[in-house]
Image (spheres, rainbow, N blue to C red):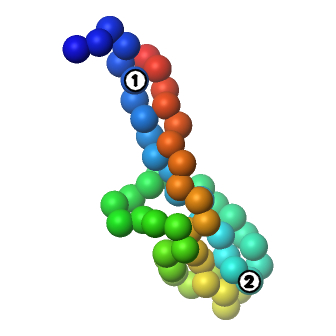
Amino acid sequence: MSDKNEIVTAYTIQQCNSCKEQSKRKFSDGDYVFKEISKCSSCDGQIIVTKIFGESLTR
Ligand SMILES: [Zn+2]
């Protein structure tokens, strides 16, 4: 066990392919880049995952 308690949280960036509206949310199981998430709520576009990254917080 190490003294450092590092917590890595993964985030998913998703973006509409039509209006380019982008949002960030916590990564959920099964996410991958270019995965189709849902229909956009503000246009008829498709929201897809554009990026997955992790942020580490040291406590
Ligand atoms: Zn849209």
| 29 lies left or right of 51 | left
Q: Residue at 32% of width from left, 8% of height from top?
A: 3
Q: In percent of the image, x 54 and y 48: which residue is there?
A: 53
In the displayed orientation, state which residue is furthest to the left: 1
59 on left or right of 38: left
Q: Amino acid at mark 2?
A: Ser
Height in image: 38 above or below 57? below
Quadrant for the N terminus, please. top left
Nearest the eye: 40 or 7: 7
Sequence order check: which comes first, mark 1 or mark 2?
1
For label 1, the crowd category at 10 Å Cα-Cα, with few meaning under 14, some 14 to 19 and many 20 or more, is few
Residue at the extreme right of the image, as rendered? 19
Give the structural element (helix, strand or loop) at label 2. Answer: loop
Q: Which residue is mark 2?
A: 18
Count of numbered tags:
2
Q: Which residue is mark 1?
A: 6
Q: Is mark 2 within 8 Å of ligand 1?
A: yes
How far, Cα to Cα, is label 1 from label 2? 38 Å
Residue sitting at x 44%, y 55%: 27
Is residue 42 visible in the rendered image? The answer is no
Residue 25 appears at what percent x and percent y? Answer: 53, 55
Q: Amino acid at mark 1?
A: Glu
Answer left or right for 4 relative to 34: left
Q: Position of residue 9 (x, y in %)?
A: 44, 40
User: Quick one: 38 or 55, which is closer to the camera?
Assistant: 55
Q: Position of residue 13 (x, y in %)?
A: 59, 59
- Quarter location, residue 6: top left
Q: Is residue 25 left or right of residue 2?
A: right
Q: Hey, which quadrant is residue 22 in on the image? A: bottom right
Q: Residues within 10 Å of mark 2 (few under 14, many from 20)?
A: few
Q: Quadrant of residue 41?
A: bottom right
Residue at the far top in the pictured view: 3
